[in-house]
């Protein structure tokens, strides 16, 4: 069984640019959630994908968007980067069965720095 | 709005002592409460969880208690070891939303 993987591990961008972060879910999982973790803070929910559709969204603007693919992997896209977008971006995968939420397992994260 | 408060923000204990971290949640519909351990440069790792139909759960040196009436839940680590040093996060979720609301974290230092 493979765990959650994310790429890249680190990324440096400049203000106004666009970025795509990638996540491969744990084997057997069908749901992916994305979180933003600012330095010294707890993770903040961005959105969740299930069956290739967004299944809930936190308090993040539309320039944060995502995709889920048929193999359950996922992308997080951020347009028009701002300095405050600098953070650790975490992907978590889980298995949804018959409406029951199961444990979310996190990847190692992508550290994004916006200059 | 939904909120989870976590205390203390830092905690130092001597090796072998116990550590307790407390969280309070605001949404009475929350029914699932996981605890995560995050080491430097890594993603959060699930260490124990509890659902609202259970008052206490134990796994070796780690236990979690839940008081639904007071909307409190706590993590207890006994016989602490230096490798327990990390940042610990509590979270609360409601099965209908599937999103986790995290606390602000507790930095635990176990002194040898």
Image: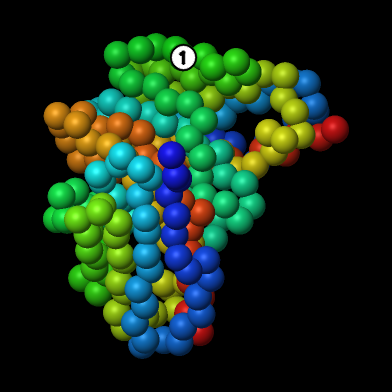
State the residue position of label 1: B57
* Percent x, y of residue A40: 56, 55
Q: Residue at x 30, y 65 (%)?
A: A75
Chain containing mark 1: B
Q: Is residue A58 visible?
A: no
Q: Which of A7 and B75 is in front in this view?
A: A7
Figure quadrant of the N terminus of chain B: top left
Q: Please tell me whether residue B69 is drawn above or below residue A64 in the rendered image.
A: above
Placement of B20 over or under A24, stated as above or below? above
Callout 1 environment at 10 Å: few (<14), some (14 to 19), or many (20+)?
A: some
Residue lying at 48% horizontally and 26% vertically, measured from the top left: B48
**In the rendering, at what x and y percent does residue B34 appear?**
42, 31
Residue in the foreground of this view, choosing between B74 and A99 = A99
What x and y, as percent, mark residue A55?
A: 16, 50
Q: Which residue is drawn at 26% across and 46% down?
A: A31
Vertical order, B15 against B1 (above or below): above
Question: In this view of the protein, can residue B75 be seen by the observer?
Answer: yes
Rendered image quadrant of residue B31? top left
**Image quadrant for the C terminus of chain B?**
top right
Answer with the quarter of the image where residue B102 lies. Answer: top left
């Amino acid at each position: 069984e493979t765990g959650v993987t994310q790429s890249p591990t680190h990324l440096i961008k400049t203000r106004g640019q666009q970025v795509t972060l990638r996540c491969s879910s744990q084997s057997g999982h069908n749901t992916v959630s994305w979180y933003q973790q600012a330095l010294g803070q707890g993770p903040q929910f961005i959105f969740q994908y299930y069956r290739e559709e967004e299944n809930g969204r936190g308090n993040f603007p539309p320039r944060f968007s995502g995709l889920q693919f048929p193999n359950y992997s996922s992308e997080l896209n951020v347009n028009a980067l701002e300095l405050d977008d600098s953070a650790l971006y975490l992907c978590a995968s889980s298995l949804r069965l018959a409406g029951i939420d199961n444990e979310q397992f996190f990847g190692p994260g992508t550290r994004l720095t916006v200059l | 709005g939904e909120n989870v408060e976590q205390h203390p923000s830092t905690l130092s204990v001597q090796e072998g002592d116990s550590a307790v971290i407390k969280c309070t949640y605001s949404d009475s519909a929350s029914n699932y409460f996981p605890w995560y351990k995050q080491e430097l440069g890594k993603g959060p790792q699930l260490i124990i969880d509890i659902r609202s139909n259970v008052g206490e759960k134990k796994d070796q040196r780690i236990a979690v208690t839940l008081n639904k009436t007071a909307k409190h839940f706590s993590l207890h680590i006994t016989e602490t070891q230096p490798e327990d040093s990390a940042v610990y996060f509590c979270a609360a979720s409601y099965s209908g939303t599937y999103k986790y609301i995290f606390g602000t974290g507790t930095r635990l230092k176990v002194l040898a």
